[in-house]
Amino acid sequence: MGERRGAVVRAAAAGLLLGAAACYCLWRRAAGGGRRRGPPAVEEKSPPESPHTMDADALQKLIHLLQATDDPLIQEQALITVSNSAAFSVNQDMIRNLDGLSVIGGMLSGCVPKVTEKALNALNNLSMNIKNQEEIQVYIEQVCKNVESAPLNSDLQLAGLRLLTNMSVTSDYHHKMINKIPCLLRVLSEGSERTQIQVLKVLVNLSANPAMTRHFLRAQVPSLLLLFDNRINRDILLRALVLAANLKKNANNEGGSMIQDQYSEDSVFSILCRDSTPFAQKLASLLHHPDPEVKEQVVRILTQ
């Protein structure tokens, strides 16, 4: 009887998901194929509002389904549908008003990685809305834990980093990420190129905030110099240079008070801010890099 009942529940859920998906497709067609969000970036803006909207009743049923079921397959598919609808600003408000943010946020601490990943993706789309960020910020510490505990370079880790990127565009919630700077720098040192690019987006956002500078400079990253090389991926190199430029600028603005702290030999401070021959040599070599943006950041560092 239990198996039969479970099958009935799954069939009903599948019908709801199919109906919601069909509604979503029809809505998108009616909206003229409104722009979907591309890969998250520091400069990314909220998608344009559309006069059309996905059926509020369908969204509410999906949110209720997420609350009612513990079937990970159903949860995953429902989250994908909610995430797709959240690519449009009018639905971002609707999902918040339906208490969808707390429902999705509550799924970040689950034990099924695929469900957690899809929940992060949904919140990432929803975080393009400032009012949504005010509610999502309570989950930042959990998102950091997800990034730290996820397998290196996994889709789950990348989903968490994308959400942290959007949540760190302004300095409002930087204080919630202070303790995870060493973790983020470790991911930077050990990750693949795709992971390095994504974690650098977060680190660049954080480094622009002078209040975060000391926490960066105390961290130990012996492999940091490896990022400043002519042969490195251009996107990685450029973001690493922006990170270094931000930190050096903020350290210089601190004046003599910054020197009073004790920094280890492998600290970010020792690598970037002391008269370090290895780093100076790297910068001198990068002055001949063919990319003008790379050279611009090198000059920015050298003239500070």
Image (cartoon, rainbow, N blue to C red):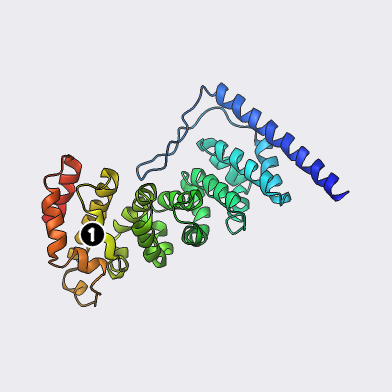
Closest to the observer, 290 or 297: 290
131 relative to 91, above or below = below
Q: Which residue is mark 1?
A: 225
Please tell me whether mark 1 sits on a helix, a strand or a loop. helix
* Left or right side of 73 for 153: left
Which residue shows up at 35% across the image and 61% down it? 185
Question: Residue 47 at what x, y percent from top left?
Answer: 45, 35
221 relative to 101, above or below = below
48 relative to 158, above or below = above
Closest to the observer, 13 or 189: 189
Q: Is residue 304 visible?
A: no
* Left or right side of 229 for 62: right
Which residue shows up at 85% across the image and 44% down it? 4
Question: Residue 283 at what x, y percent from top left?
Answer: 14, 54
Quadrant location of the C terminus? bottom left
95 relative to 242, above or below = above
Q: Is residue 111 visible?
A: yes
Closest to the observer, 226 or 33: 226
Question: Residue 266 at what x, y percent from top left?
Answer: 25, 70
* Left or right side of 24 for 70: right
Q: Label 1 sits on what residue type?
A: Leu
| Count of picture labels | 1
Residue 41 quadrant: top left
Residue 277 quadrant: bottom left
Question: Residue 118 at what x, y percent from top left?
Answer: 56, 46
